[in-house]
Amino acid sequence: MRDDRLAWPIVLLLLIVLVPSLGMMWMMREAVENERLASDQRLREAYVIQLQSGKKSIRDRWRSQMEHGVALLATDTPAIVFQRLVSSGSVDGVLIRDGDGKILYPTVSVLGQNSVEIRVPRWRRAQRLEFAEQDYAAARDLYAELSEEQLGDEDRCRAMQSRIRCSLKLDETDIALTLLEQLSEDDEAFDGRGRSFAATAQLQMLELLDPGTEPYRSVMTRLENRLNDYSKPMVSTQRQFLMSRLLDIDSSSLTFPTRDAELLSSEMMSNFNEASVQNELKPTSDPDLWTRMSKDGRLVEWHRVANLKQRLMALTDNVPLASGIEFVISQPNEQSTGMMDVSLGAGFGGMRLGLAESSPNWEEAKASQNRVLHAWIAWLVVFVTCVLAWLLSRTLKQRLRLARLKNDLVATVSHELKTPLSSIRLLVDTLLDSDRDAANEQSIKRDREYLELISHENARLTRLIDNFLTFSRIDQGRQDFEFESIDLRDVVGQAIAIFREHWKEVDSCLRVQHTSPATIMGDKDALVAVVVNLLENAWKYSGDNRQIILVTGVDGESATLKVEDNGIGLNARAKRRVFDRFFQVDQRVARSRGGCGLGLSIVSAIVESHGGAISVESEFGVGSTFTVTLPGVDKHDAGECDGDERDVNERDVDEQGIDEQGVDGHARHADVAAREETH
């Protein structure tokens, strides 16, 4: 019933705490949802602004790039302009023309006739010696004479090429390499088709040298630099051929950034139709290529779709974007992957600019993270609230339990004091009202019987007060113990003598067994109180046919004392609380037999203060066994204290004699203890 009375306040307290917490969680969820909607609206507005800024940036910078390319034609050669535009990554291919529409770059080799063969008869003779008569030595010497005459650069270089050819046929490799080295230094000599003699000579040297040697690597590096240097004139067809030839020889260490642009530009040049090219960006017949032309027609650009998208997006790098958002470009016939997009307008062939998440489900992942964070916060709030509510309920329960204990204490003390006082007052009134002159035998017998009852009730009051005083001193840490070497049998004997004064039927139900002598260090009066309280507990909670067994002995280095009864026993819950203050197993027995629930708690405190331990074994409805274990004293230590023990035994005999004189001595002892406690 008492637990039921405590349950409702605790449930009410939990409701008071949890209901506001749940309401707060609901309001937090609604606030988060409203904030999310407002945030989405703000994001959409920001996205529109960013799209417009990105579109403007693309249109302005795209136009500036074309104007910049046209401006370069006024200061650089067409070949250098081609290289700069391609190297900047702004085009995949480019066609450069003059104002009349003539193609300036890429250039192609043209067919021409070698005039030296017509003007110089000895040239024809040298060719006859080489090819018809196969007199390579004579042909070589004649070619050498021709190369030293005052001819043009082309004729001189051609004579050197023929001389090198004859030397190779004569296995004069060293002479051929020397002549090729001389020819490779002539950067200004070109044949009738516009091809560079120096570049051709370097390629031929690579074919004669051993790969991996230092001369081979030197020639390879020089030729690579020549092909990448557009300041040195060279027709596009020769440049493309030499780039491809070198990559076939060594593709791992050579780099030609303009090769793909050269090939694409040459391919587009062969199919170029000015009518199909306009000033705006538009797709070609090849779906992978888009093209545009400058307003004056001097620059024609080609862009592959993938690269075109990257170039257009790169033009938005000056537009700030939120984390996790990026620009995307889509073609007119392509489904946009962005959250929203906008057309780039005229001049871009229907290309669209959009905003997309930089990672899949970025927005959902972010929202999920926020939801998880809010959920954790909410659960943390609930958890902390529940913990605080639990602590508060526990504190409340402890306060209520303490209040209940105080009430029980007041009720118990009132009952325990009222009953003997009422009996004493009734007996005293009876004695006062009786005929004092009737000193007959019956009156004397009755008076003695009443006095014995008064003595019994007085002893009961004395025990109650002694228990309260002992409990108070132990609880406040003011209980002083006088330790001495004592025999446990003496403690038991004195306790039984005191116990026998309280209950006349002790001899018929109490059996004492001393299995072996046990000497301990302790306060004798306190230990006597331990044994008396254990015996009274066994007596109180046993029936009319009670049997109490008290056993003392030695267990190893410890002295043991057991009190066994056949009483009502203890259940599991009572066993855990049997040594608690004011705990009583059966209130009805406590009321009929007396007691306030302090005896066993005092026993436990005294035993622990002596360095010992107390335990209980019990079976409900069968009985209980209380076991006290105390540190023992060996025989050597006991021998040193024999003199002290004799003195103690004499004092015990005297005290026992005083106790045997009756109730008056015991009452005087209680009065002394009460006065000491008062002081």
Image (cartoon, grey):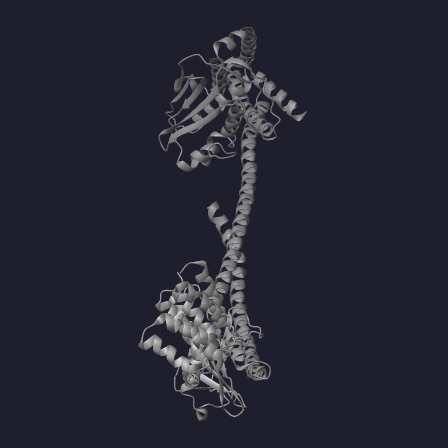
Residue 671, image x, y percentages: 62, 21
Q: Nearer the viewer, residue 42 or 325?
A: 325
Q: Nearer the viewer, residue 220 or 284?
A: 220
Q: Nearer the viewer, residue 164 or 391?
A: 164
Look at the image and tell me whether residue 571 can be seen.
Answer: yes
Asked whether, in this view, residue 543 is left or right of residue 18, the answer is left
Look at the image and tell me whether residue 306 can be seen.
Answer: no
Residue at (42, 63) in percent of width and height = 174
The answer to whether 42 is drawn above or below residue 641 in the figure is below
Residue 140, image x, y percentages: 40, 71
Which residue, as the protein is rendered here, is positioned at the far right?
Answer: 679
Asked whether, in this view, residue 654 is left or right of residue 553, the answer is right
Q: Nearer the viewer, residue 60 or 290?
A: 290
Residue at (36, 65) in percent of width and height = 171
Asked whether, in this view, residue 522 is left or right of residue 127, the answer is right
Residue 295, image x, y percentages: 54, 90
The answer to whether 571 is drawn above or below residue 658 in the figure is below
Q: Quadrant of the C terminus?
A: top right
Residue 243, image x, y percentages: 43, 72
| Residue 334 sits in quarter | bottom left
| Residue 553 sits in quarter | top left
Total labels drawn: 0
The answer to whether 348 is drawn above or below residue 89 in the figure is below
